[in-house]
Image: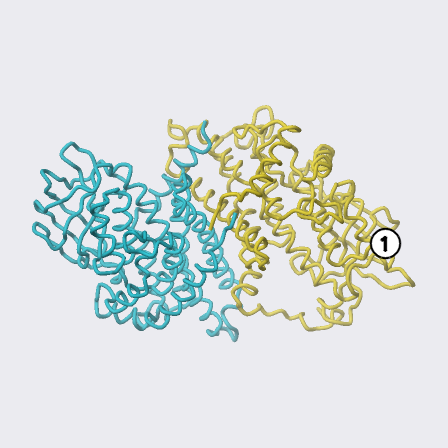
Amino acid sequence: MDFNDTPEEAAFRAEARTWLSSVAAPRDTRTSFAIGQETGEFEAEFPAQRVWQQKKYDAGFGAIYFPQDVGGRGGTSLQNMTFMQEEARFDVPVTAHFMIVNRGCCSLLMKHGTPEQKALIPATLRSDLIWCQLFSEPAAGSDLAGLRTRAEKDGDDWVVNGQKIWTSNAQMADWGVLIARTDSNVPKHKGLTFFIVDMKSAGIERRPIKQLTGASNFNEVFFNDLRIPDAHRVGAVGEGWRVAVAFLSGERTNIAIKELMPLIGGIVNLARQTEINGRPAIEDGEVRARIASFYIREAGVRFTVQRMLTALSRGETPGPEITIGKYTLANLVQEMTAFALDLQHAAGAVMSPAFAPFDAVFQSEWFGSVIDRLGGGTDEVLKNVVGERILGLPEDIRVDKTMPFNQVGK
Amino acid sequence: MDFDFSDEQKTIRDEARKLLSARCDRHRVRKLLEDKAPYDKELWATVAENGWLGTAIAEDFGGLGLGHVSLCVIAEELGRALAPLPVSSSLYLAAEALVLSGDTTMQQELLPALASGQLIGTLALSEAMLPQHALSRLKTRVVGGQLSGIKLPVPHGQIADFAVVVAHNENGGVGLYHVDLRGPGVETQPLQTIDAAQPQARIVFRDAPARLLSADGERIVPKLLDRASVLIAFEQIGGATAALESACEYAKIRKAFGRQIGSFQAIKHKLADMYTKIEIARSNAFYAAWALEADAPELALAAAAARLAATEAFEFAAKETIQVHGGIGATWEADPHLFYRRARALGSLLDSTPVWRDRLVEELERQFAA
């Protein structure tokens, strides 16, 4: 048990810090603690985020744990974590949001892709290409395997018809990962196949969805006789569910490695600046109790990630405990930001950046926190995963599980 | 960074679990409870023979010198087995207090006997409803080498051979004193407690001979409480994990409405919440274990977080394990009340949740200086 850097780890940290200081200004943690959730302003923020990702990539810090032959650094997950810790000290755009999907697509293609598909990886890691995830449908959210978008073989192509929904970034995506039904005569999990989609293809229509923030970053995506070459199939026909599950578990881990300590520091500072009963709020017992409870969960997830990284660095399979990270952090951000608004008293409901504390960052992260509780598996679905896969509890009754998909609901 | 137990520590864990499942099963724990025995003497002799008590005591003082992370490993197993042993009082409190006091003469005299289990020590700090961190308000006092006042509750006070007593000196400072509990001027009264296996006593001192260990109580006691709270956190996590296992087992066999109750999301999600709290506590406790052994400056923050998370996890696991068991969970015959008792007893042992929360935020305030 040693929490300190080894000499090699310390050398990497120093290298990262030196490079970061040469390209960015230190972050003022008293005033800056945006954590880069999906706030709905993505189109405006994206150009600067892409430039930063490209800069990191070119310096060898943008794809740390990917092998060199696909354009990565050939480093470790631990180095990636170290870089994230150091990056959080600097005033730089947050790239986590779109890179979660981009990295997920790259990991997927490395494992299941053909050489032609793998050729897309370097440009994706550099964020020259942006990807979107065509999974959820109006009638298939938590029950993703109940999706209805059909892909039918026609010569060397697949012809796709159907609709996806809640697709982040589809409006600017170059590529998408798609799961579609290729066989309705077998039970729902067995008739699915995974594809990559060139989003410039004919037969794709995107319609923005106005989100609760008022901005639009989600889309509906309609496929009308979209033709996908069979060369863009990922994995075997009928194996799509397995591929999708692997993809989603990666996404959950990525959400779990957000750096939230700056947000906790922000709340401590905010509580110094506002008052309760004529005293600084930080002296109030309930305020202290809430802050303590935030820290415990934040540190708990952070150190759970360290346990995972240790297992990886020892060449062991990480334990299942990281599953708790995604829903713990998503709920935590929602609670913390709501509490920060409480600390602002009546001004908590003001969104004008000029008048809301810290440019309204708590207000906008409070809206953003809604998304992380849903995307990549809702709290409820993930607790089923913990109950069934980790604790070995029996499955709930699933009436459609073994029935051919075309008989479901009849 | 290497954030896990070593292979050697994992071996210690496996051996400890094997021994305790053979020698300290639930029947044994229950028998001690029903006999109202303050501790399991036979088991104490066995774990002493196996060297467990000397795990973190330096080799120069008759211990094994394996370090505190190894003692954390053993603590988790003791907690999992609900072992009725005075390990916390004798080692996490008394031995740690002796080491922190810096009194090498008394260390030479007492640590080897604590490591061998020949003596049982404890810490006499609490005075009724005063928080343990509220040192300035202690009423016990040492005048001319003689201690007077009342300590309540003193963990394992009725079986301990000696106590490290925290009391005011003649000048109003806070000192640590060694007092022979078998000596003159000591009147010990066993108390009824929530958990009979975590016995407590009321001790009245009337001019009891007290030897000064350190006059630096203001510095030493908070550190002692930090260090002990990390070890207790591992006991709490062990107990919480055992409670979760028992609830899961029951949820798989008990049927209602024609199905195993564990298939209902109301039960499944409750158990998932238990697991979540336990893993949050475990990860915080890992960090605290490192800070404890390394004596890192992060110890105060890490110990408070580990203490709070482990207390919450064990209390939640214990009460919800009863809930999952339904009516049977509220009976004497079923096991869940053993967890319920132990969770509360350990939650009270070292300052309460509000006190630790306050300490945690003090550390955060330091970290995020204005």
| Percent coordinates x, y for residue B96 in the rendering | 29, 48
Q: Which chain is cyan?
A: B
**Does B19 appear above or below A296?**
below
| Mark 1 residue element | strand
Residue A113 located left or right of residue B50: right
| Percent coordinates x, y for residue B352 in the rendering | 32, 47
Residue extending farthest top: A354
Q: Residue at x 41, y 62 (%)?
A: B12
Q: Residue at x 90, y 63 (%)?
A: A154
Q: Let me know if residue B315 appears in the view.
A: no
Q: Quadrant of residue A8?
A: top right
| Subunit ID for the residue under disc 1 | A
Q: Which chain is yellow?
A: A
Q: Amino acid at mark 1?
A: Asn
| Percent coordinates x, y for residue B43 in the rendering | 28, 68
**Does A39 appear above or below A188?**
above
- Frontmost residue, A137 versus A18: A18
Q: Let me know if residue B230 appears in the view.
A: yes
Q: Quadrant of residue A19?
A: top right
**Does A387 appear above or below B155?**
below
Q: Quadrant of residue A402?
A: bottom right
Q: To which residue does mark 1 refer?
A: A224
Q: Residue at x 51, y 33 (%)?
A: A266
